């Protein structure tokens, strides 16, 4: 069988975050960052990306650690593999939502290699964009999915590009109110994970706000939702592994049968992870009766403008909310 | 000439991370280089000059541009490009063709091997990253001419139809059974989810793993 060899390049092991940042500065757009390298490598095989230098973050051991913080939260190094996160005691003790999401990502092989940082910073799965089409996201001036096949694409919040965000980890972490810590040439910054993602309205060529020479170093989960009721579901096109058509992560705090607070976050519906605020507001302060759940899970994406191919996603989103709430009731 | 020409001092010094080789290293390397030129086979007798354990390159690797890989319990020295993937090295340089290229896109699992006991897709894994770790391929399963129980089961239960996916299936199954000796049918399905079979022979593959669990 004819195989695609990757064109020659230099693979440099970064010894520290500072070293990585320096290398990225030095080589500019000739360099690409890799860590678990389950996706970037496939762009290289396709020769859709041809960096001269790969800056490998993997040797930076400080970014692999997962630990409980002094206030009962979690600090997860961006280089922790998906299987490490899934199996870690500190994660399973009170934050099982994260472990559940991790277990649904890809395959055992990819979970052993891929990192949680990579899951959050992954690129669009749009088959036109990945197929080398000259679309908006690739710098062109059309969206091939709108005129072509869009069954996996976004139904809401899009602008020209209708890619859907694919991450399973992101929804669980946003539901728990996680922050990301980023280091770059100007030092360290931190922001809520929910603001880390960038939609096509703001910048159509990226999925997140990491600059080329910035490194996502940690994910910090506060203790706020520790031990509450959680629900995670991922819907895919087949029983075996696949990216999500749609997924939902729910963190729900109840007193008695009344919902005192909750967060519902879904992916696969918009270019960035989507907080389902309409449904949240409808059920917050109310009891989890069948009729309350039914009305809260009606038309949860009020501003949706689906394509003919993906109208089914509206019902899917409603059903996911219904199942998340019913599961806790 | 014997190995005593290169005495123990050729051991790489711990903590020497100055980057370039020291004068001492160069002298050692020169001795090593002469040995290769004169008697290439002697190189095999100076193992102590190569990397030990932690993956830091030793003198042998630095002067021959080779990496030391541990494949199926044996040390293999091989020259590797930066962009080279483990499946390429195993198949084209080490002759271990049991590991298959299927999709070459981390989707089908035909290239599954174990690195330190965990299954990974070797088509999507740089060979450099495997330095210092234990690589196990399907060739490493049989012992003394005796097939591994999982291999036996795949034969008995007709786990292989065209069998192109079988080596990968077996490696995923091995990783599962090492962690869980008595898996349920569901657990077997989960463990094999990263291995696709175009013959659609999944039932027999699952049965093979379940029956292997009983044999082990």
Image (cartoon, coloured by chain):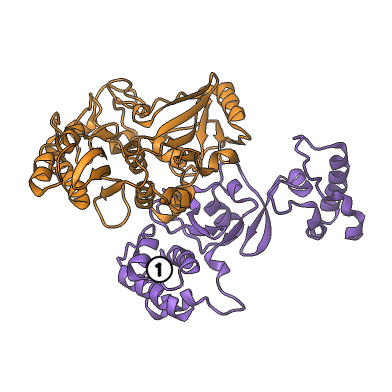
Chain colours: A orange, B purple
Q: Give x and y (percent) for residue B201.
A: 32, 69
Q: Give whichever of B176, B77 is nearer the camera.
A: B176
Q: Is residue A213 visible?
A: yes
Residue assigned mark 1: B163
Number of numbered discs overlaid on the protein picture? 1
Percent coordinates x, y for residue A132 in the rendering: 34, 33
SS label for mark 1: loop
Query: 10 Å neighbourhood of mark 1: few (<14), some, or many (≥20)?
Result: some
Quadrant containing the N terminus of chain B in the rendered view: bottom right
A233 above or below A14?
below
Q: Residue furthest front?
A: A256
- Image coordinates of residue A293 in percent, x first then y, are 12, 44
Q: Chain of mark 1?
A: B
Q: Residue at x 45, y 38 (%)?
A: A117
What x and y, as percent, mark residue B208? 39, 75
Looking at the image, which residue is at 48% across and 66% down? Answer: B179
Q: Is residue A92 left or right of residue A275?
A: right
Along the horizontal axis of the image, is B126 left or right of A1?
A: right
Q: Is residue B171 above or below residue A305?
A: below
Residue at (88%, 42%) from the top-left corner?
A: B27
Judge whether B128 appears above or below B203 on screen: above
From where the camera sits, is residue B192 visible?
no
């Amino acid at each position: 069988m004819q195989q695609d060899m990757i064109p020659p390049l230099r693979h440099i092991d970064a010894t520290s975050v500072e070293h990585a940042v320096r290398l990225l500065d030095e080589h500019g757009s000739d360099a690409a960052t890799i860590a678990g390298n389950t996706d970037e490598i496939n762009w290289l095989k396709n020769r859709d990306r041809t960096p001269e230098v790969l800056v490998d973050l993997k040797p930076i051991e400080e970014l692999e650690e997962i630990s409980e913080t002094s206030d009962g939260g979690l600090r997860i190094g961006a280089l922790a593999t998906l299987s490490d996160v899934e199996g870690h005691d500190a994660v399973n003790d009170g934050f099982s939502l994260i472990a559940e999401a991790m277990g649904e990502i890809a395959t055992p092989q990819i979970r052993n290699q891929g990192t949680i940082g990579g899951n959050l910073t992954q690129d669009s799965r749009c088959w036109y964009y990945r197929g080398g089409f000259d679309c908006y996201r690739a710098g062109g001036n059309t969206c091939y999915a709108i005129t072509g096949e869009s069954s996996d694409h976004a139904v809401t919040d899009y602008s020209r590009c209708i890619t859907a965000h694919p991450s399973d980890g992101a929804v669980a972490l946003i539901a728990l109110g996680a922050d990301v810590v980023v280091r770059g040439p100007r030092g360290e910054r931190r922001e809520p994970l929910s603001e880390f993602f960038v939609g096509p309205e703001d910048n159509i060529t990226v999925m997140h706000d990491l600059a080329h020479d910035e490194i996502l170093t940690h994910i910090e989960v506060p203790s706020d939702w520790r031990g509450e009721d959680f629900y995670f579901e991922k819907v895919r096109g087949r029983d075996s592994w696949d990216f999500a058509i749609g997924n939902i992560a729910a963190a729900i705090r109840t007193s008695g049968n009344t919902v005192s607070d909750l967060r519902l976050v879904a992916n696969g519906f918009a270019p960035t992870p989507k907080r389902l605020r309409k449904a949240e507001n409808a059920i917050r302060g109310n009891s989890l009766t069948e009729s309350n759940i039914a009305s809260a899970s009606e038309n949860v994406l009020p501003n949706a403008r689906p394509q003919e191919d993906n109208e089914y996603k509206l019902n899917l989103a409603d059903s996911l909310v219904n199942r998340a709430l019913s599961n806790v009731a | 000439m014997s190995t005593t020409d290169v005495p123990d001092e050729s051991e790489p010094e711990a903590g020497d991370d100055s980057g370039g080789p020291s004068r001492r290293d160069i002298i050692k390397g020169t001795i090593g280089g002469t040995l290769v030129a004169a008697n290439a086979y002697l190189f095999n007798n100076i193992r102590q000059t190569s990397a030990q354990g932690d993956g830091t390159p030793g003198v042998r690797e630095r002067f021959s541009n080779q990496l030391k890989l541990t494949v199926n319990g044996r040390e293999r020295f091989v020259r590797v490009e930066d962009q080279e993937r483990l499946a390429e090295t195993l198949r084209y340089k080490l002759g271990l063709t049991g590991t298959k290229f299927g999709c070459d896109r981390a989707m089908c699992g035909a290239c599954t091997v174990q690195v330190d006991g965990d299954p990974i897709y070797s088509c999507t894994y740089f060979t450099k990253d495997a330095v210092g770790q234990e690589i196990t391929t399907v060739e490493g399963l049989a012992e003394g001419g005796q097939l591994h129980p999982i291999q036996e089961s795949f034969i008995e239960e007709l786990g292989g139809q065209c069998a192109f996916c079988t080596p990968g299936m077996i490696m995923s199954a091995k990783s599962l059974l090492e962690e869980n000796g008595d898996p349920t049918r569901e657990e077997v399905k989960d463990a094999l989810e990263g291995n696709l079979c175009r013959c659609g022979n999944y039932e027999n593959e699952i049965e093979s793993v379940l029956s292997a669990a009983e044999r082990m």
